[in-house]
Amino acid sequence: MSVPESTAASVRRVRTFVSTTARPTTERERERRRIAIMCLPFFALATVAGFVPLAMLVRMSVAADAVWIEGWSLDAWRTLLTEPTYRRVAWNTVWFVGLATIVSVVLGVAVAHALERYDLPFERAVVAAVSFPIALPGIIVAILVIAMLGRQGLVTNAIAAVTGTSAIDLASATAITGLFLGYVYSLVPRATMVLRGTYAEVNTQAEEAARSLGASRWETFYHVTLPEIRPGIAAATILTFRSGLAIFGTVLLLQSHHVVTLQIQREISVGTYRPDVAAAIGLVYVVFIVAFTFVGLRFVRTDTVAI
Amino acid sequence: MSEVTLESLTKRYGDELAVDGIDLTIRDGEILGIVGPSGCGKTTTLRTIAGFETPTHGRVRFDGVDVTHVPPEERHVGLVFQSYALFDTMTVRENVAFGLKMRDVPRRERRERAGALLEMLDISALADRRPTTLSGGQQQRVGLARALAIEPHVLLLDEPMTGLDAALKTRLRTAIRDLLSDLGVTAIYVTHDQEEAMAMCDRIAVLNAGTVEQVGTPSAIYRRPANAFVANFIGNSTLLTGVAADGRVDLGFAELEVAAATDGTVTVAVRPEAFEFEREGPINAEVTSATYLGDRTQLTATLPDETTVALHADAAETYRTGETVSLSIDDTSVHVLE
């Protein structure tokens, strides 16, 4: 008897909750209604643009006919688990984006430190220069890399002129180093923006106290600043890594390293059209990102940094 | 501990002159208070001594050695901040031992010395706590222990009591003063609280607009202010104009037996407590406001020449606005400004 009673009580509580939110009488209920009004549009959008397509992906990945989404089959998942190509793609993606993330966050710490700790001349121009790659499409970043490091690239030809080496031998735009530079260039602003916010919270007097106690600038950074910005570094790492995983335009043009976004594109290209495998890869990708974010958030103090 | 000398110390930020040619010596083992209104240059002076600012002109010397261009980490200066500025990611003991660690003092010795300081400041029970879990007074003690741990040439305290409640402030300032005296630490104590400076310091330097107006013992500063600024900034003074001649100053409505350096028109600083309430006094003043402060009643009154004066009256008496009070001035408590 207790189970139906508790179910009935729960239903009553939910009904009360909904009715008081719709017609609030206390300030707490009015606050709840304001929160509902503010959040509902996003969740409506997320349902249409995120949750429903995600459910579609699940269905596609187990469909015998992924085009018309009919029948049931685990072929896509079997392919994903058994063909070595996909394991290689996963590993390629993780190490490449991981390394680009580490380099970007290190550079981001340096830039954020410079921007927040010192009165820089033309600071606004510096901020604009650091942040503008966020707005660049990946394809444009790839073109910039080619313009610098391609066979006719500025840097390639400058080095060729100085060293006497052939520009064709030196060109690295479509080598993995060119792609890596493109990734880092796109990711540094994301890391920097998060870290600037963290740096603004750092207790500068604690840093001065450390120096008066005999710590050099580096020791002060290591013992005092770094522990304080650690949550920001964790947040920047999560954001940067997630952004790095999603880069597509740059790798599509430069094609020097086989990562997950490029593989998804290949799965849905004419000739190798396998939407069920693409859907399965997409699902693995989403689950990985969600899990990574949850694990990463354990290292982030949510009251100081938001992602 | 060291003697600290500031020679023509000047600090300019663009067009703004923060410190304007200060000459000051802080004797070995003394506690010198630096007081002054906001923006008078006291914190800039302190930061220059610590090495966080390089003076535009002038020199800083420790025991005669020029340290003007020595970086902060090599100056051996202890700093105590108003905001405590503790290392929140370390325990109290690690905070106190930090300076020793930077000096490569072996771990065991670090622990012992930090423990002794925590004991001295009566906070050894907090050794393994994080600073964020401590009260303001406890945090300030940790800050002091941390600064003292390196046995600094000079200890700089920048408004260390601001933000603490009145009772704690009184307790802590006695504890700090006694501790610094026992250790013989040369200390510079910056505060905007003149009462705190008087209670804590051997001498006080009064700063105004980047210059030193007067340096002296608390008693000398209070009883013999060098000028109108000091007379008004340290305590409460009424400045009266009179004519000096033959060892007397004629105020028009009363005459004081007080010698002035020169005859002619002079300014006399009169503290509230120099006014004595009489049944039949030579001066009549009209009360314009009365504020009960517990231990006394603070009155403002208008003298016959329309000057407004501050008076300290017996708290047991009741005064009303518009009432006339009869006063005399204690000649020995007034000071003729030069």
Image: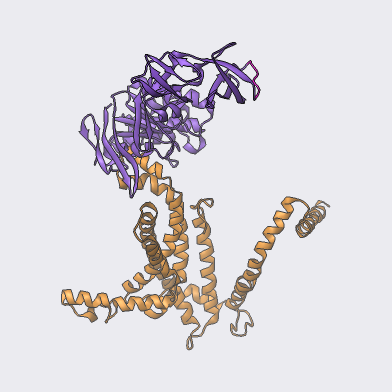
* Residue B288 in sight in this render: yes
Q: Residue at x 72, y 51 (%)?
A: A28
Residue B229 belongs to the span the image colors magenta: no
Decide if residue B55 is on the left or right side of residue A1: left
Residue B170 drawn above or below residue B12 = above
Front residue (pair B334, A49): B334
Decide if residue A33 is on the left or right side of residue A113: right
- Provide residue A29's location: percent of width, then percent of height: 74, 53
- Provide residue A30's location: percent of width, then percent of height: 73, 55
* Residue B218 in sight in this render: no
Residue A63 drawn above or below residue B167 = below
Q: Tell me which corner region of the image, top left, top right, bottom left or bottom right, holds residue B151.
A: top left
Which SS type dominates the magenta stretch?
Answer: loop
Q: Residue at x 66, y 69 (%)?
A: A44
All told, the count of numbered labels is: 0
Front residue (pair B91, A60): B91
Q: How is the image coloured?
A: by chain
Residue A124 drawn above or below residue B223 = below
Rendered colour, chain B: purple
Residue projecting furthest to the bottom: A271
- Provide residue B149's location: percent of width, then percent of height: 34, 30
The chain painted orange is: A
Front residue (pair A69, A300): A300
Magenta stretch in the rendered image? B316-321
Decide if residue A54 is on the left or right side of residue B28: right
Q: Tell me which corner region of the image, top left, top right, bottom left or bottom right, holds residue B277.
A: top right
- Provide residue A196's location: percent of width, then percent of height: 43, 56
Residue B218 drawn above or below residue A241 = above
Residue projecting furthest to the right: A1
Q: Tell me which corner region of the image, top left, top right, bottom left or bottom right, holds residue B266.
A: top left
